[in-house]
Amino acid sequence: MVKEQLEEVREHIREACARVGRNPEEVTLIAVSKTKPIPMLQEAYDAGARDFGENKVQELTAKKPELPADIRWHMIGHLQRNKVHQVVGKAVLIHSVDSLRLAQQIEAEAAKQGMGADILLEVNVAREESKFGFFLEEVEEAARTISAFPHVHIRGLMTIAPFVENPEENREIFKKLYQFAVDIGRKNIDNVTMDVLSMGMTGDYQVAIEEGATMVRVGTGIFGAR
Ligand SMILES: *Cc1c(COP(=O)(O)O)cnc(C)c1O
């Protein structure tokens, strides 16, 4: 079942890319495997999935040693500073950096481990009270501050769009974040690139791709309801 669902999502990604003349290779599908058991992840792996997303540090670190070593693990959930040491060096990308203090902690840990840490800044585009993330007008200053951290590398932006019935309702949000990333990218801030735009989940990834997403995070669409 996972294999078929994964194939269907890939097909929808290709279709969304075709509608706007994008190359599907520009879009990385992250299989969001939170709460799902190892055999389901293995099934996705066997069907070709190599990027997996988890929202809890404990779950990521528990699953990683049970599965093939070439999986790229993405930390996509809110990260507490006291858990940073467990995730630096294990996740290829931390999508959910939502404060300067968290970025500072990642810097300290990456320095300690003698490695770089790739991150995205999480942006609360819709200014929802229930969500983490920087407001748009805070992002540039945060990026400039973090750009001075030698071990942390900002690769782009991430957003969790509002939960909506009709994905079209989120189109403006994706458009806005895309344009914003382009604008920040043009400022050529040292040590900051805007190549990654992580946006779109099961309900709205096709719209997100049409508006420029380079990473989509799909859980339910691949593994079924949680
Ligand atoms: C759970 C989760 C997803 C995937 O959600 P689905 O609607 O199941 O596709 C994507 N991003 C984040 C940050 C999540 O926590």
Image: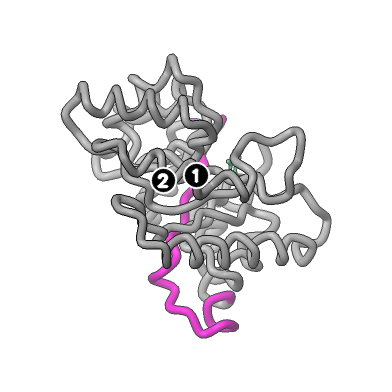
Q: Residue at x 59, y 83 (%)?
A: 19
- Three-letter code for the amino acid on which mark 1 is drawn: Glu
Asked whether residue 31 is drawn in magenta, I would say yes
Real-space Cα distance between discs 1 and 2? 5 Å
In this rendering, the answer to whether 105 lies above or below 175 is above
Horizontal side, residue 79 vs residue 104: left or right: right
- Three-letter code for the amino acid on which mark 2 is drawn: Arg
Nearer to us in this view, 135 or 118 = 135
Q: Which residue is mark 1?
A: 141
Relative image position of residue 147 (x, y in whole percent): 34, 44
Nearer to us in this view, 98 or 69 = 98
Relative image position of residue 69 (x, y in whole percent): 24, 38
Magenta range: 16-37
For mark 2, give the secondary structure: helix
Q: Residues within 10 Å of mark 1 (few under 14, many from 20)?
A: few
Q: Residue at x 76, y 48 (%)?
A: 163
Relative image position of residue 67 (x, y in whole percent): 32, 35
User: Within the image, what quadrant is residue 171 found in?
Assistant: bottom right
Q: Which residue is mark 2?
A: 144
Dots 1, 2 in contact, CB < 8 A? yes
Q: Residue at x 34, y 36 (%)?
A: 91
Quarter placement of the C terminus = top right
Number of numbered labels in the structure image: 2
In this rendering, the answer to whether 76 lies above or below 111 is below
User: Within the image, what quadrant is residue 84 found in?
Assistant: top left
